[in-house]
Image (spheres, helix red, strand yellow):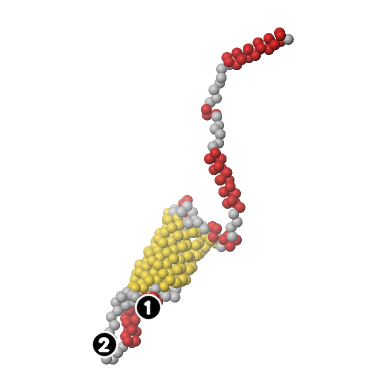
Amino acid sequence: MKALAAACAALGICARVAAAQTPTVPVPRDTVRPAPSDSAVRDSVVSRLLDQDSASTVRPAAFSLLGLDRLRLRSLGATVGIVRPGQAVSTRIYSVHADYGEVWHGVRLVFASSYWATRYRDDAVARFAEAVRDVVRDPSRDDSVQIGHVRLSDLSVAADARWQPGVSARPSALARGVRPWVGGGLAAHFINVEGAPVSGTFLERALDSAAIGLTTALGLDLTPIPNFQLTMQGRYDFLSTVRYASVRGGASFIFGPAGAR
């Protein structure tokens, strides 16, 4: 037994000596994969949860039925033109518009805002002065009424639906770049009237108004180069206090590759 113990001890000593003499091969640092950090794990979990919530979100049926789930900003532009309100002097009209794409096949939704300012024509003011003289006329004295200019302005915000007939079915790219359209919608108008004859009177309060009106329009869009569009349109705005026609022209920038609509 003593001999067996001595042999085992000798073998253990030899094994330790061999291990000490065996060179250690270093592991390249590039092959060592670091443990994932807590922030990376957290970001991965949050991203996965957000994806699951987005997939499980239930949108209202009316939202999809009306095509509103497809609305994206497609183009942004501005126009300038001439407007002549009823009984007022012609003036310039300035507007900006944003095209949010198709809500139905061939029908696009466009939001627009416009502004113009002018004055009533002299003959309209003269008729108003004559009406005032008829009311206050006194045979014993001169009842001449002096009335200056009466100014008015309009700021409007409109939502238009514009229908373009069969653009995608046209045979050539040139034909598809010419887009006639017809449209109409609703607009909120904020009318302001001011001037010496009416300022501070019940007439100013009666003429100043905020009203909802109808709009109709006929236009033509041209796309000469990608992402750039020229637009022309004739428009008529109808509301209870003011009615006017306008002719406008301008340009738009189309978002997306090569002006994709």
Residue 212 rendering spot, x and y as whole percentages:
46, 71
Residue 157 rendering spot, x and y as whole percentages:
44, 66
User: Regarding mark 1 in the picture, which secondary structure is present there?
Assistant: helix
Residue 47 rendering spot, x and y as whole percentages:
56, 45
Q: Which residue is mark 2?
A: 142
What is the residue that sits farthest to the front in this orientation?
Answer: 2
- Residue 250 versus residue 29: which sits nearer the camera? 29
Q: Quadrant of the N terminus?
A: top right
Contact, mark 1 vs mark 2 (Cβ under 8 Å): no
Gap in Å between the C-alphas at discs 1 and 2?
25 Å
Q: Which residue is mark 1?
A: 202
Q: Residues within 10 Å of mark 2 (few under 14, many from 20)?
A: few
Q: Residues within 10 Å of mark 1 (few under 14, many from 20)?
A: few
The quarter of the displayed image where residue 196 is located: bottom left
Kindly identify the residue that appears in the image at 27 percent across and 91 percent down. 140
Kindly identify the residue that appears in the image at 58 percent across and 15 percent down. 20
